[in-house]
Amino acid sequence: MRPDAAVARYVFRLLLRSRLAVLMLAAGLVLIVGSFVLTWLTPGTERRTFLDVTYLGIEWMAILAPILGSTILQIQEFDQRTLWLILVRPPGRASFARGRFLGLAASSACITLACGLVLAGLLAVTGGLPERYLGPVLVAALGEVLILSAIGGLVTFLTTSYLTSLLVQLGIVILGYLSPVLPYLARKATVPLLDPLIRAVYWVVPHLSDFAVREFTEPAETWYLAALTGYAVLYAGVAVVVSMLAFRRRDV
Amino acid sequence: MGVMGPAFELAEASKTYYTWRRLRKTPVTGVREVSLAVPRGVIFGLLGLNGAGKTTTMKLLVGIMHPDAGAVRVLGGDVKDPGIRARIGFLPELPYLPLQLGAVELLRCYGRMSGLAGTQLESRVSTALETAGLARGRPDPLHTFSKGMLQRVALAQVLLHEPEVIFADEPMSGLDPAGVHEMRELLLRLKAAGITVCINSHQIAEVERICDRVGVMAAGRLVREGAVGELLALAGTRRYRLVVLAKVPGGTGWGIEDIEVGEDALADVLQSQRARGARVLQIIAQRGSLEDVLLETIRQAGPGHAS
């Protein structure tokens, strides 16, 4: 087995065996079932309410799973030093960074897809299929998982405190959702250095608002989803390379 | 194994850490210009007080840390080389294991990372568990294990890929007397099998008992290194016990006195005893211990070395 795959398999098992995975899945199920109950309070728009809440839930699963997963890894690897017993084995630091990203992305994708499957099952039981938004929402959510897993890996290699890394990742997500308004804010900036700074942030943060396909008036078309996936793969690839470089000389 | 060079060596290796204090980056010396070459097939002990640089040296040797200057070579190669890392094992002071996984599951993961697969992986997992004294059948996650059981899992992960050099940081710390005995026997068995073992320990009596060579570290430097026998001989001639027959102070009778004296003061003490009319009955050269060597070496290394 390739070293990257061995590390990925280890990280995947580690995260799916953690309490986080159980909590996330439980939260996802409560949200989906809760939104189903909520439809009783909104007569006439039952289906719309149900789908709006569950799609939002899936999107947040795709955001929280990699962020919390990378934080758990940081606590275990650096604070509890489980990393020591990996770094003394053949996979090098670059392999470890790649494998860790793959494992984190795979476990986060599993949690997100599990919520999607429950939703699809519920729709099938209630005669709600076919649902045109389900596929695009899941594809976009997986794109977000890719990007945020790579960012999670990078941030946890750059910071020494899990609290800092958690806050930085949440900050990146917020800026990512605000990315469409950043050029406008840059134009309005009166302080000299603020304009280039905001523009730099615009180019660096992932444009997560583009992934909110549940808000589209029509389901996202295939070409849009392909472009979105391409962007996610490219962004994640760059972030993984940077995290490999960041981890190369870090003392643990 | 081919040409038998040293099992591991450090050449002028230095490592400095940096800590932030009051927004200032402060350098802290980990190890300074450490040079050491340990032959294959021996048990080598690293001794020193807390903060002497023993764990940093071990971290450099296993590749968890990289030196700022100098070189670290294990089994004739760079520890950054995955092929070299596949031939070393590391037992940390505390079993740094992810507690949500089961023992077999975790060992399989470590085995895959060490390049094992299929039936070879399964048989190595079974052998490692057996050697470490663990029953294979227990699938529970590690958080249900006792401290002693976790130490055994940590030991199993070291033996899993049959390394040629094992680095063990405080291998006997936290073990009960039976555990210490088992660990000692295991380390001796590994040595008999031709495996080089480097241990870092505060349990000097154990080090004296099982190690062939020792290195003493103080303030990040290696201040003494040699065969245990040589170092003990060095310490053995340095202290004497005098048994003298002298008048009881303030009385009329005679009594036996025991006086411990260092080599430097021996002549003066003998003269003063004779001058007070005492009879020296016996002069016993005391067998020094490794503890004496350690403390004496650190004292000789000068101020700042006893951290």
Image: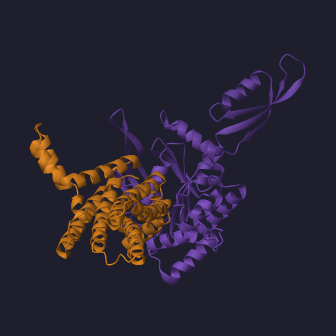
On screen, B222 above or below A68?
above
* Residue located farthest toward the bottom when viewing the structure as drawn: B119
In this rendering, position of residue B38 left or right of residue A71: right
Q: Is residue B149 visible?
A: yes
Q: From what the image shows, is residue B180 above or below residue B121?
A: above
The residue depicted at 46 percent of the width and 56 percent of the height is A76
Q: Colour of chain B?
A: purple
Query: Which x, y percent locates residue B135?
Result: 66, 71
Residue A43 position, x and y percent, is: 36, 63
Q: How many numbered circles are shown? A: 0
| Most foreground residue, B240 or A146 | A146
- Pinpoint residue B55: horizontal percent, then vertical percent: 49, 50
Which quarter of the picture shows residue B9?
A: bottom left
Q: Is residue A186 left or right of residue A85?
A: left
Chain A rendered in what hue?
orange
> Where is B282 relative to B179, above or below?
above
Which residue reaches farthest top? Answer: B250
Question: Looking at the image, can residue A161 be seen?
Answer: no
Q: Residue furthest front?
A: A44
Nearer the observer, B91 or A189: A189
Q: Nearer the viewer, residue B266 or B28?
A: B28
| Residue A48 lies in quadrant | bottom left
Q: Residue at x 43, y 58 (%)?
A: A73
Q: How is the image coloured?
A: by chain
| Residue shown at 21% from the left, 62% from the top | A210
Q: Position of residue A142 (x, y in %)?
A: 31, 68
The answer to whether B219 appears left or right of A224 in the picture is right
